[in-house]
Amino acid sequence: MNTVFPNRILPYLLLAPSVILVLVFFIYPAAQSVELSLYRVNRVRDVQVYVGLENFERLFHSDSYINSLTVSAKFTVAVVVAALTISLALAVGASLPIRGFGVYRTLLIWTYALSPAIAGVIWALLTDPAIGVLTDLLKAIGVNFNWRQSPDDALIFLVMAATWKILGYDILFFLAGLKNIPHDVLEAAALDGANSWTRFWRMVLPLLRPTLLFLLIMNTLYASFETFGLIDITTQGGPGRATNLLIYELYQDGFKSSSRIGLASAQSLVLLAIVATLTFIQYRFISRRTFYQ
Amino acid sequence: MSNKSRRILFTLLSLTLLIAMALPGLATAQDPTQITFWHAMSGSRGEVVQAIVDSFNEANPDVNLVAEFTGSYAETLTKALTAYSAGEAPNIVQVYEVGTRTMLDSGAIVPVMEVSGGELDQSQFVEPILNYYAIDDELRCMPFNSSTAMLYYNKDMFEAAGLDPEVPPATFSELYEMGQQIIETGVAPNVISFGWPAWILEQMYAMHDQMLANEDNGRGGLATETYWNSEFGVQVLTEWQKWAQDDILFYGGREYSANDPFIASEFAMLVQSTSSLGGIQRAVEFDLGTAFLPTLDGYERNGNNVVGGGCLWTMAGKQDAEYDAVWRFFQHLSSVEQDIFWHKGTGYFPATNAAVDALEAEGWFEENPNFRTAFDQILAGNDTIAARGVLLGDFVIIRDVVGAAIEDAVVNGVDPQQALDVATEESNQILEDYASLIE
């Protein structure tokens, strides 16, 4: 069905604010990144030297960048898998008609309201190697957890904090998705003798696929781009380079040095290309098997 | 309306108009000059800065100085330079020693001598501080918060371990032996932690009179080569790695996060900036001792400890009246009264000789021997080029590179030579990038 606007200009006017926002805050800076990636720039002195693709070449010959790629891959996979699994389990639990479920739901969504930096502060305090409460509890059961002195612990620590922070968001969408599953279908299956496990695997999960696809993409974006604050406030990429994710490496080159904004721009384009490819693959792979109602 | 009343009305109107026209002039004459000051002093340090700013504003009603906390040192530097490109720079910005070369080459600053119209008397400053920030013998920024690193130790724990609480370790090997005793007696599971490890490595170079870069440590021209992987550097890092492997060194992060566990008696010694003294002294419940940094065996303390901390830079592109106000603030800052207030409130060095004399006269150092340690330490060695400290372009990111190398060796068990080779190569690349856009 086509909605016909009586006024030909009105729709453009209505669209204008969003279009302008996107142009000014996304398209223009992105275009600038493309340009900058071909230069070596000192942003304070306003000196610019054209270097062609040198910045990209350097990236792929840099051990430190290759390390960041590997660490980012591990981190992203861990966060996405952990976040989706845990949030789905919690959402299914919270969608059951139990007493006080309204309160549970609100509490579960809470973490979404925090910024990654705040999440970092909370987890850094909890697991501080010397004075953290959680560290003491872990020590009591014989686990020595120290994210300042162990590269593995550092990555685990970041994955925990990042996962915890995104749970609220995922649960919110899973709850909405679960609510949309028609009750009568599940009831019919139950009457036909399908137990709750089968109902979950055979019916609930397939019906949740659109939500799952959406969250998979959003969580990948989150793990790739939004975890900067968390890292900066806790491990700062260390120990060594154990948690130097792509986004953090980019920040260091772009903002902590005066002459590497070109290199940082090249990194941002590579990161964009990687995430775009992942999104495309996820979309193609899952949407083919997704049936929308 | 009669003629008379018309005339009155006309007169009134003219008067109003005249007054209205004069108002803007009056307003500008009375409006205080606005100047801004960006700094990186949080917590109790920030409160002391604000108190100094308030006293300045009170004494100078025609100036309104607004001080703003703009995040960590690195963030403040980045923000100020970005703001300069956008034409919105503050008048004054506090930059840590690492940013010195970047500020010098930025073209965004006015040297403090110029700001003062040649009135600044350089000889009023304590010598090692002057030596760090003077390039070609001329100060470029206003010395403000200067510190160095020293050894803090817990006398109670020394006593509990059967060590003499009045004899802190003077060398690396003494530190190692005392550390073993502290662990063996069960006093603490770990012995020592560092704040700012990369800076401590720089301190080691300076106090053992080792050069860190070519071009006279970056003071004769733009340095293009660093010597992190020199025999000396590798030796220091090898020692640190051994300490870590034997549980003596508890790695405590890149800034101040080691302070809290030290205060909580989790370990017996801390190498940290002298500027933490005020905070630590107020917080500890044990008997606190301080000492010079231990030396590496086989080397002598030839140089001074290098000065760290911050300096106040004046940004370019402002009105004359603003520069005048900035200069008045700098004078206020270096007055004996304010300098002493700053020193007592934070632990940073008094910057001027006059303040040091006044503190001596009132017996401050005798009552507070811990404040004396730091001061004695920067005067203990000889003034050499190596001891003045290295200046590097984009030192901010180079320090991260070195910080990562130290963590790789100390925490991740990477061979110190290999870790420092990587750091040297990366540092040199950064310097090359930097130089390619300056010349």
Image (spheres, helix red, strand yellow):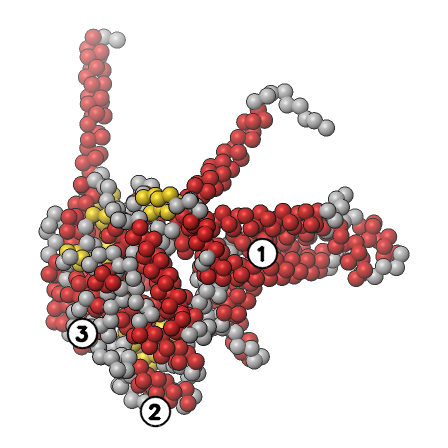
For label 2, the residue is B162
Residue A166's label in the rendered image is: 1
- Residue at image coords 15%, 68%: B356
A113 lies above or below A131: above
Q: Quadrant of the N terminus of chain B?
A: top left
State the SS at label 3.
loop
Report in which chain the residue with disc 2 lies.
Answer: B
Q: In which quarter of the view is residue B136 placed?
A: bottom left
Query: Quarter-wise, where is residue A163 in the image?
Result: bottom right
Question: Label 3 lies in what chain?
Answer: B
Whether residue A1 is visible, yes or no, is yes
Q: Secondary structure at mark 2?
A: loop
Q: What type is the residue that disc 1 sits on?
A: Ile
Residue at 19% over, 66% down: B385
Q: What subunit carries mark 1?
A: A
Q: Is B27 placed left or right of A183 in the picture?
A: left
Report crowding for label 1: few under 14, some 14 to 19, many 20 or more residues within 10 A (C-alpha): many
* Nearer the camera: disc 3 or disc 2: 3
Are both tags, 3 and 2, on one chain? Answer: yes
Q: Amino acid at mark 2?
A: Gly
Q: Left or right: where does residue B38 sit relative to residue B410?
A: left
Residue matched to label 3:
B381
